[in-house]
Amino acid sequence: MSKAIRIHRTGGPEVLQLEDVEVGDPGAGQIKIRHRAIGLNFIEVYFRKGMYPAELPFTPGNEGAGDVVAVGKGVKTFKVGDRVGYAAQPGSYAEERLIGAQMVVKLPAAIGYETGAAMMLKGLTAQYLLRRTYRVKEGDTMLVHAAAGGVGNLLCQWGKHLGATVIGTVGSEAKAKLAKKAGAKHVINYSTENFVERVAEITKGCKCDVVYDGVGKATFPGSLDCLRPLGMFASYGSASGPIDAFNIALLNQKGSLFATRPTLFHYIAEREALEKMARELFKVVVAGDVHVPITKRYKLADVGEAHRALEARETTGAAVLLP
């Protein structure tokens, strides 16, 4: 038997229950992983609350890192003992799990388990946003909402590394210092400043090439007003609630803008794409160009406490669960 977090009904953090589960042996194309660390992400709050549908009961969690302890029929790319990581595969809040081998990558020796668990979902998200949704180049100006958060922190670091001018928004002075340290040249405290007006001041009216928005309702449509004509609005999260339906003509009125609501799963659906994205992520982390800040560690049994901290906006950087 193995321990796992199970949700039998949606609701508050109290619905996260630690239980004994039978994992079993891997089937064809699967591997069995014993987790050393598990990533913690805000999207798991949405699943716990029922905002995103999932068949009950279920084990939440979307990323992890650990060791391969068994290999199913037909798997040629992994062997017992390999160090691996993965993202966008529900069911990670567990000591052990089965997973399709095609969605897993080997961790480089230079990347530890905790870093691997903390970086896969957030790091691959930053990769596709910066290199595929909108390909940031030297001289670009980018706006990153929630710049001290898990994805926001990585976007600031990586954007600076790519030669962009990074503007970050945060909700407190403490978070402003973190965003500045991460690479934001300019930081706006949206609890005391109007971010639309400040972006216009900072850019001398030229505005931004791209806005990366993981906040949602509270920053829309203001984010559109921060874009120059033909700019890209990338909405990748809804921490303040989902964006309501809007008249698409608004994009025309504000400068023939582009708007997208991407998700990591579609970007890594093809094995070749996953491997390429992971290589690029690992390269910048190993080189030290992007640092994955792990600011909090929780025992798996204390995941309810972790979710309370997430919802209270008390977390910065990345947090991990330790089974």
Image: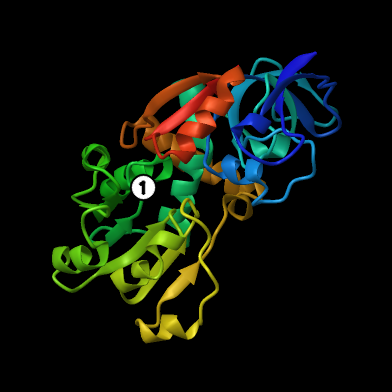
Q: Report whether 22 appears left or right of 254.
A: right
Q: Which residue is mark 1?
A: 155
Q: Report whether 319 appears left or right of 165.
A: right
Which one is in front, 69 or 20? 20
Which one is in front, 238 or 100? 238
Q: Report whether 285 appears left or right of 81.
A: left
Which one is in front, 138 or 119? 119
Determine if residue 116 is in view: no
Q: Position of residue 251 (x, y in %)?
A: 43, 80
The C terminus lies in which quarter of the figure? top right
Secondary structure under tag 1 reads helix
Q: Position of residue 155 (x, y in %)?
A: 36, 47
**Residue lying at 79% horizontally and 44% vertically, measured from the top left:** 55
**Residue lying at 53% horizontally and 69% vertically, measured from the top left:** 244
Residue 281 lies, with reference to residue 169, above or below; the image says above
**Residue lying at 72% horizontally and 50% vertically, measured from the top left:** 53
Residue 221 lies, with reference to residue 4, above or below; the image says below
Q: Position of residue 259 (x, y in %)?
A: 47, 71
Location of residue 87 (image quadrant): top right
